[in-house]
Image (cartoon, rainbow, N blue to C red):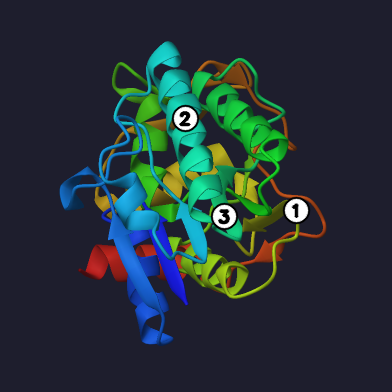
Amino acid sequence: MKIVVIGGSGLIGSRLVNALRGCGHDALAASPRTGVNSITGEGLAHALAGADTVVDVANAPSWDDQAVLDFFETSSRNLLAAEAAAGVGHHVALSIVGSQRLPDTGYFRAKAAQELLIKASGMPYTILRATQFFEFVGAIVQSFAVGEAIHASPALIQPVAADDVVAALTDIVLAAPVNGTLEIAGPEALPIDELAGRFLQASGDRRKVLPDVNARYFGAVLDDQSLTAGKTARLGAIRFEDWLARSTAR
């Protein structure tokens, strides 16, 4: 099977390409680095020729509200049109849990717009919504910094390891389109302020964590459902504590 991974040079894409190749498939890492640009259209037709499935795990280079919306809408329109022309049979996209629940966050609005384009395209598709990756916890914690302290929301978060997301995507790619959305999350949900405290302690960072119900997550005030998955979500196998221990050891 020929599988084109858009964003194939990134955190998720590079691991997914390796996983699919390990299963014996012809997986192409497509990104501007390899001459395939979903914004300009450069190299798309050539890359998609003969492809059975396209997996879109590309991320926007800028998270400015308008820039991120423009990126996901333009990229998705170009990809879906090129896939239709090439006769691709399955469009797989990685989105984010809570994309419909946090309209005050520009990135979430952009992912919701991307999902709507996919659903309206007529292409057979599967959308996988993932919670925040363990690998991004440091940036999440820093986003709550106010002076020399971390004013973090006590709302629940359910982060997941990138490797568990890749495992889920691999299974989706090798299955039939569901023409709907699936979710993956970490095996446990915990308050963000607690997560921040664990991360800072493991990192040797002595800043204090102060719980703040009004703290905004990239513009949005959170509740316990904002960043947690539903009851039918696939749960990853890797616990945050185990990932953290391995990461700090490295």
* Residue tagged 3: 92
Q: Report if the CB atoms under discs 3 and 1 are less than 8 Å apart.
A: no
- The numbered mark at residue 19 is none
Horizontal side of 88 relative to 229 (left or right) equals: left
Q: SS at mark 3?
A: strand
- Residue located 71% across and 42% down the image: 122
Return the residue nearer the eye: 149 or 230.
Answer: 230
Residue 191 image offset from top left, x and y in percent: 61, 42
* Residue tagged 1: 179
Residue type for callout 3: Val
Mark 2 packing: few (<14 Cα in 10 Å), some, or many (20+)? Answer: many
- Residue located 26% across and 42% down the image: 205
Marks 3 and 1 sit apart, C-alpha to C-alpha, by 10 Å
Q: In the rendered structure, which disc, 2 or 1, sits on the residue that comes first in sequence?
A: 2
Residue 18 occupies quadrant: bottom left
Horizontal side of 35 relative to 116 (left or right) equals: left
Q: Is residue 236 above or below residue 131?
A: below
Residue 119 image offset from top left, x and y in percent: 71, 39
- Residue located 51% across and 31% down the image: 77
Q: SS at mark 1?
A: loop
Q: Is residue 243 above or below residue 213?
A: below
Horizontal side of 243 relative to 95 (left or right) equals: left
* Residue tagged 2: 72
Q: SS at mark 2?
A: helix
The answer to whether any part of residue 223 appears in the image is yes
